[in-house]
Image (cartoon, grey):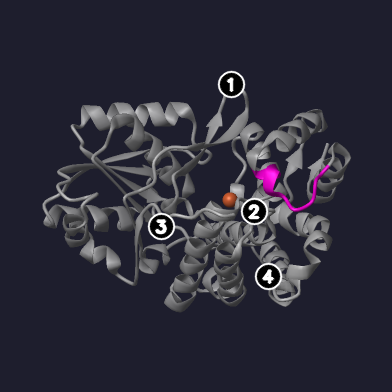
């Protein structure tokens, strides 16, 4: 048995953002929005023009905006509480999630808890997949855990590859590897099904084709479009099939090491998890193996090119990482059952442990 619903309306296309007010007015879930809280991460040189462009488009379409740019990477409950205060203080009636996975995940909870009339997600990175689901991953700074919680799916997800063209090379790399990991883990998942397989399969081939061009020449819109589609497809696949040990480990480590970068954690873990799992899925991997090998080679090459250092884990944290990973929801759909010892070996192979 599998179960599938697409909870939000998806629009994809170059400069689709220009049509946003008209699209919102026509859609029953988003019509009538008067003042939107734009929930985003820290405004920096690369994303400032995107935010200003969207504010201007909404203003011309009769929608007021207020910006809340207080969402940190690996967002915390405190970030979300501040966003809720801002929403109410600014008299908003709708929320726009604008950015990568962190602001989109946080915005869903703000919209849910504040009873926002509409929630629109506009990704400016190509990796999260969060724009099409009701799931959020939130860091609890008291328990040092990252929890996956079901909140509210966006009413509309608007994906415009032009908005991703100013992403710096490292962010392009991290987010694309994250999208690839969603595709690969959902393809190998215990809950994979024909629907999720079709999406994950196509997503893997899009990443193989477009990863290096997008990192090396950001304004290549063909590559940007390919990676954004790869992210969208894998985001829907993981909603249906779940993920695996790669995300159980990455999310657990991210809860303990708050400054870690999710996509880079995944990049360091994924090939080892693939080696651990692939015998269990020998029937399925033949068709994807050449593309997967090509992507792993690219990941190694680009990691060197971008001067990325292997992350360090403290030995005193390893037991906690293993315990929490075994309990993490993503571990339930990993194709091969992992023991404590298996995870210790994986961590030792992927990271510097001191
Ligand atoms: Fe991820």
**Residue 295 badge:** 4
Of marks 4 and 3, which one's residue comes earlier in the chain? 3
Of marks 1 and 4, which one's residue comes earlier in the chain? 1
Tell me the mark number nearer the camera, choosing from 2 and 4.
2
How packed is label 3: few (under 14 Cα within 10 Å), some, or many (20 or more)?
A: many
Residue 16 image offset from top left, x and y in percent = 29, 67
**Residue 25 badge:** none
- What distance separates the C-alpha of mark 2 from that of mark 1? 32 Å
- What distance separates the C-alpha of mark 3 from that of mark 1? 30 Å
Report if the CB atoms under discs 2 and 4 are less than 8 Å apart: no
**Depth check, front residue: 261 or 196:** 196
Q: Which residue is mark 3?
A: 124
- What distance separates the C-alpha of mark 2 from that of mark 4? 24 Å
How packed is label 1: few (under 14 Cα within 10 Å), some, or many (20 or more)?
A: few
**Residue 191 badge:** 2
- What distance separates the C-alpha of mark 2 from that of mark 3? 29 Å
Of marks 2 and 1, which one's residue comes earlier in the chain? 1
């Amino acid at each position: 048995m599998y179960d599938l619903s697409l909870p939000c309306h998806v629009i994809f296309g170059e400069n689709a953002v220009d049509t946003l007010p008209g699209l919102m007015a026509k859609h029953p879930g988003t019509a009538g929005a008067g003042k939107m809280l734009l929930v985003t991460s820290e405004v920096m040189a690369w994303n400032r023009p995107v935010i200003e462009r969207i504010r201007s488009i909404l203003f011309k379409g009769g929608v007021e905006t207020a910006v809340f740019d207080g969402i940190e990477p690996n967002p915390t409950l405190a970030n979300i509480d501040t966003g809720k205060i801002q929403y109410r203080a600014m008299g908003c009636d709708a929320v726009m999630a604008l950015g990568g996975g962190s602001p989109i995940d946080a915005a869903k909870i703000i919209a849910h808890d504040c009873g926002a009339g509409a929630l629109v997600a506009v990704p400016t990175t190509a990796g999260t997949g969060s724009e099409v689901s009701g799931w959020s991953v939130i860091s609890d700074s008291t328990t040092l855990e990252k929890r996956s919680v079901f909140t509210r799916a966006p009413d509309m997800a608007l994906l415009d590859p032009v908005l991703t063209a100013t992403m710096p090379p490292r962010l392009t790399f991290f987010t694309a590897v994250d999208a690839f990991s969603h595709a690969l883990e959902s393809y190998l998942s215990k809950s994979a099904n024909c629907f999720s397989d079709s999406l994950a399969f196509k997503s893997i081939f899009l990443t193989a084709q477009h990863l290096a061009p997008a990192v090396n020449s950001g304004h290549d819109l063909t590559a940007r479009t390919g990676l954004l589609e790869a992210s969208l497809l894998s985001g829907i696949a993981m909603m249906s099939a779940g993920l695996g040990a790669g995300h159980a480990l990455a999310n657990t480590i991210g809860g303990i090491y708050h400054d870690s970068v999710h996509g880079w954690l995944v990049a360091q873990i994924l090939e080892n998890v693939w080696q651990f799992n692939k015998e269990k899925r020998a029937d399925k991997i033949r068709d994807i193996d050449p593309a997967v090998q090509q992507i792993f080679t690219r990941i190694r090459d680009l990691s060197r090119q971008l001067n990325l250092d292997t992350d360090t884990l403290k030995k005193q944290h390893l037991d906690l990482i293993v315990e929490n990973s075994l309990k993490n929801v993503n571990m339930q759909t990993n194709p091969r059952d992992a023991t404590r010892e298996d995870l210790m070996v994986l961590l030792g192979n992927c990271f510097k442990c001191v």
